[in-house]
């Protein structure tokens, strides 16, 4: 799971807003893999690019994406990159954000046996289309160093509750001020959401025939 070694002992972060006290931000933990992958699968099941990658009925698509996210989360965690969740009072993850810091080494860690096991559930065709999509996305990344807001997902049951905004702010706080923060989205309705956090349009491209918007938040320090 994409988050630093601190995943092993996540501690809730102090939050001064009483209304948010029941839902604490914490560093992603290794043991959250199953529940966080399920959150992401539900959050992205109707994403246009996910549908293009996995053209299957909704229940099957969600199941395949759950395995795909488990593989991605494990790789991210092993690469010691930052990730945070918002959890409910019982500690159950409700939303998650994965980020990649430009000036941190990103070794190609992977759990090969687990990835092969996951491939049986994801399906070869879906996996190949996912690899192609990742290559297209990477080819449109900015040339300069940046913090990459890789994935942000909120469980549909908790959307429009402010959790997504809290996690975006967490990424902004954790990013070096001299670096831009970059992301892509295949949902046009997300443009206004990210715009409220200082992200500006940086172009558009097509991936598997799906329009994808590039957004960037400019550095706040020289």
Image (cartoon, rainbow, N blue to C red):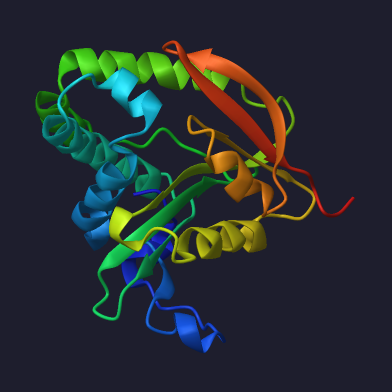
Residue 185 is left or right of residue 177, and the answer is left
Using the image as rendered, state which of residue 217 and residue 192 is in the foreground: 192
Residue 116 drawn above or below residue 73: above
Asked if residue 196 can be seen in this view, the reply is yes
Left or right: residue 7 versus residue 13 is: left
Please tell me which residue lies in front, 214 or 142.
214
Task: Please tell me which residue is depicted at 36% across the width and 18% down the height of the picture.
Answer: 131
Q: Is residue 207 above or below residue 191?
A: above
**Residue in the foreground of this view, choosing between 174 and 65:** 65
Q: Quadrant of residue 91?
A: bottom left
Q: Position of residue 94 (x, y in %)?
A: 32, 63
Image coordinates for residue 190, horizontal then vertical, percent: 54, 42
Q: Position of residue 103 (x, y in %)?
A: 65, 44
Q: Residue visible at 49% across and 54% down?
A: 82
Q: Quadrant of residue 79?
A: top left
Give the x, y percent position of residue 157.
29, 60
Residue lying at the far right in this picture: please name it: 222
19 horizontally vs 142: left or right: left
Is 183 rendered above or below residue 85?
above
Q: Is residue 105 visible?
A: no
Residue drawn at x 54%, y 33% is: 188
Q: How many marks?
A: 0
Residue found 43% across the figure and 22% down from its top: 134
């Amino acid at each position: 799971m994409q988050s630093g070694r601190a995943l092993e002992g996540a501690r809730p972060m102090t939050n001064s807003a009483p209304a948010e006290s029941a839902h604490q931000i914490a560093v992603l933990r290794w043991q959250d893999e199953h529940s966080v992958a399920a959150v992401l699968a539900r959050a992205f099941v109707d994403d246009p690019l996910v549908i293009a990658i996995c053209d299957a009925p909704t229940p099957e698509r969600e199941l395949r994406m759950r395995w795909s996210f488990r593989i991605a989360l494990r790789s991210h965690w092993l690469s010691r990159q930052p990730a945070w969740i918002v959890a409910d009072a019982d500690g159950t993850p409700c939303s998650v954000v994965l980020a990649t810091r430009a000036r941190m080494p990103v070794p190609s860690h992977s759990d090969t046996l687990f990835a092969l096991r996951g491939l049986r559930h994801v399906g070869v065709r879906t996996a190949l289309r996912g690899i192609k999509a990742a290559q297209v996305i990477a080819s449109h990344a900015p040339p300069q160093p940046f913090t990459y807001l890789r994935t942000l997902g909120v469980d549909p049951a908790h959307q429009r509750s402010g959790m997504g905004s809290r996690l975006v702010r967490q990424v902004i706080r954790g990013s070096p001020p001299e670096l831009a923060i970059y992301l892509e989205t295949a949902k046009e309705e997300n443009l206004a959401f990210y715009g409220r956090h200082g992200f500006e349009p940086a172009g558009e491209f097509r991936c598997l025939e799906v329009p994808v918007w590039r957004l960037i938040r400019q550095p706040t320090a020289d």
